[in-house]
Amino acid sequence: MAPVALETPVHTNGASTPVSISKKAHAFDPATQQLPNIDPSKLTIKLNPELAAVPAPEKLTFGTIHTDHMLLLTFSPESGWSAPSIQPYGPMSIDPMASCIQYATNIFEGMKAYMGADGKPRLFRPDLNMARMKRSADKLALPPFDEQALLKLIKKLVLIEKRWIPTAPGCSLYIRPTMFGTRTGFGVTPSTHATLLVILSPSGPYFPGVVRPISLYAESRVRRAWPGGTGGFKLALNYAPTLGPTRDAAKMGYDQILWLFGEDDHLGEVGQMNAFVVLKQDDGSLEVVTPPLDGTILPGVTRHSVLDLTRAHSAESPIPGLPTDLVLHVVERDIPIAELIKYSETGKLAEVFGVGTAAVLVPINRIGYGEEGKEIKIEGGANGFGPIAKAVREELMAIQEARRPNAWSVPCEE
Amino acid sequence: MAPVALETPVHTNGASTPVSISKKAHAFDPATQQLPNIDPSKLTIKLNPELAAVPAPEKLTFGTIHTDHMLLLTFSPESGWSAPSIQPYGPMSIDPMASCIQYATNIFEGMKAYMGADGKPRLFRPDLNMARMKRSADKLALPPFDEQALLKLIKKLVLIEKRWIPTAPGCSLYIRPTMFGTRTGFGVTPSTHATLLVILSPSGPYFPGVVRPISLYAESRVRRAWPGGTGGFKLALNYAPTLGPTRDAAKMGYDQILWLFGEDDHLGEVGQMNAFVVLKQDDGSLEVVTPPLDGTILPGVTRHSVLDLTRAHSAESPIPGLPTDLVLHVVERDIPIAELIKYSETGKLAEVFGVGTAAVLVPINRIGYGEEGKEIKIEGGANGFGPIAKAVREELMAIQEARRPNAWSVPCEE
């Protein structure tokens, strides 16, 4: 497959540009002082003397256990980024007045490592995660960092924790880079100090049990995100407000929330995933729709990849498992819930699915809306998968697991 | 002054109602199990053997130092709320996978203790803070708690730390109740575990130096809050996204952001304060306006109190320092920035000020808007205070410092 342009270009201030910071807290500005950036050559490794037993793959759930080690770096305005340390996983000492506790200056990424048949761990499009994390840090006025240096250290950590990478289908080593502000004080001002951690968690499927479709409740009273807000960034603070509505939806028998937005209540995200809808057209072609990146939608790496794969289907690279003469019209546009209902009523709503790093691709079979128990029902094939969802998921996983050679799958090497 | 109805009623599930929680993480529900609530009778006190020196009041800034002790409670779904502990202030041990680090399940309150002339520390309308904190916890699916029991413990902590309460004008002991989720795991699900801390910080004026007016930059690209969002709740996550825009405004020479909202760019908050505008009317009366609680505005305790005081002026309780025949029309309504500009151009924009617990009341003398260096200028009297700002601030502080007896000022007693 031809290399695909990055949705968001990786910023150009890479390895050679030192990060910097002003000493005046109220005018924290990365452009005024030269400070050491992340330097992988200064890595120190302190191995854990007590290695834990790796659980059997069939016992793995999503994100509940951690490996033996973590990567740790700290930033101060006096010293810049510290020498990186790979050390035993363990609790951190945090001041109660720290910015991360008081003002939620916390960002993260979600990535996965897969074990290739050649014995090399592989990451999936990690440059996209690094670029997004850099934008997240900038959004919350956290210190900038050299994302290629961080990626190098993540690869090193994955290699050290290689034995933790599960090889069973649907399993992977989930990678959670996390950065948070550690400045102490109640003044609402950028965090001059920060900690950057990378944690690894061997994980099974995001939704436990057999692969199955999930159900959604369409939420229009609580808004997850808004233009000019933070929904387009990977920030810890986007998640806490979703917990209550998701709990309430669970009481009504739904797995996740379908977030709606705007006066027309158009589709936003699906739980913590990007939404895709497949609509039948009169000429036998299919419209593949996902909401546009208007500031309310996370620019997901999987979203990006599904757009790339489906757009390439009718051009240079047909997706295996789909008829080569099937025409897919791939569009980023708003879909009002009323339009979804109308397509459903006329039998033209072919598929709905959610995509994301944690869950990869999950079909949706029911969407509740309104207060009268109304539901959109979506027919699926085996395990609830429609043909597009099935073929795209299989292709994504084939690339991620390096069963199909592809530049998106990046090996971890010394 | 007559007692004023609470803006938000204190919830009725007080001391006698145990909190409860379901054991199933995805159906975390406070109504299904009986668990111990906060119990002040179980308080243990471990005094700090090394007491710090109390700084001179003239050296105090806002929220930079802490007292010798803190109040600590923890919640688990097995044991409910732990026995409260007053213990030496110190760092906490937090797991890197904790909910407060990964998903920003962090809430707080801002309160102040003042030393009365009778030697009794006093809190200002603490019931309003407790009720708001309870709503914040519910918003982020954190465990419920008995707010009267918490208030009792806060009073106890303030009494123990009495020597830290500064008595110089403009100084007070700032109180920061903080609660955050400590469940570990990457699944996006309510935090079954939590920590509740109360920290005290002897504080000088929020804006350092002599009392002076501050300047604002009107921001319409980044939106602080949205109806259906979180702006009406006191959550850590509302603050991190404001840091970048505030830093950028500082570079342009402005102290804080005036947050705008909607197609008409109407006024929202002022930095971390509620906004008030005073408009001259043709008949010699004044309109006192603040944005309504539409979900984008924090229901501030000081905002509430300023509304109460100004509404009472033309009725039963004139504000000292203002002519008793001055008519104030007190209104909660949207004010588009264009309306503010128009009032300014016709010489009818009398005053603009921000109010909040930390800053009490601060006059605004300049509001920059647009990209061409345009500014609204507001004339003030001594230190930039217009007559309404001056009289209201003095009255608030007289009540807070218990110089004027009032039911709003609540003594801390054994």
Image (cartoon, coloured by chain):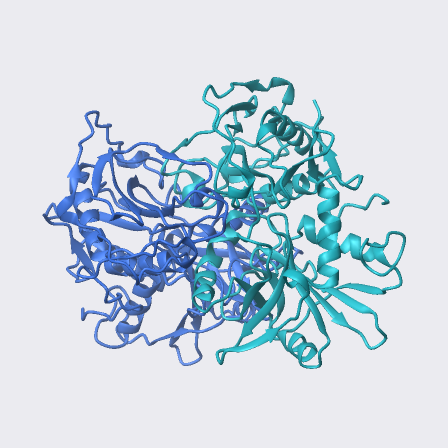
Chain colours: A blue, B cyan
Residue B67: % across, % down: 51, 31
Q: Total of numbered circles in the picture?
A: 0
Q: Quadrant of the C terminus of chain B?
A: top right
Q: Is residue A412 toward the left or the right of residue A104 in the image? A: left
Q: Position of residue A26 (x, y in %)?
A: 43, 56
Q: Nearer the viewer, residue B237 or A212?
A: B237
Q: Nearer the viewer, residue B28 or A132?
A: A132
Q: Nearer the viewer, residue B105 or B86?
A: B86
| Residue B79 in sight here | no
Q: In the picture, which quadrant includes the N terminus of chain B? A: top right
Residue B88 at x, y = what percent? 48, 25
User: For residue A273, which quarter of the picture?
Assistant: bottom left
Residue drawn 73% across and 33% down?
Answer: B117
**Is residue B163 rendered to the left or right of residue A197?**
right
For this view, does B113 lie left or right of residue B235?
A: right
Q: Does residue A131 appear in the picture of this structure? A: yes
Q: Nearer the viewer, residue A379 or B396?
A: B396
Percent position of residue A330, x then y: 36, 74
Question: With B261 as the anchor, is A37 left or right in this view?
Answer: left
User: Measuring 60% from the left and 75% from the top, which residue is drawn there?
Assistant: B376
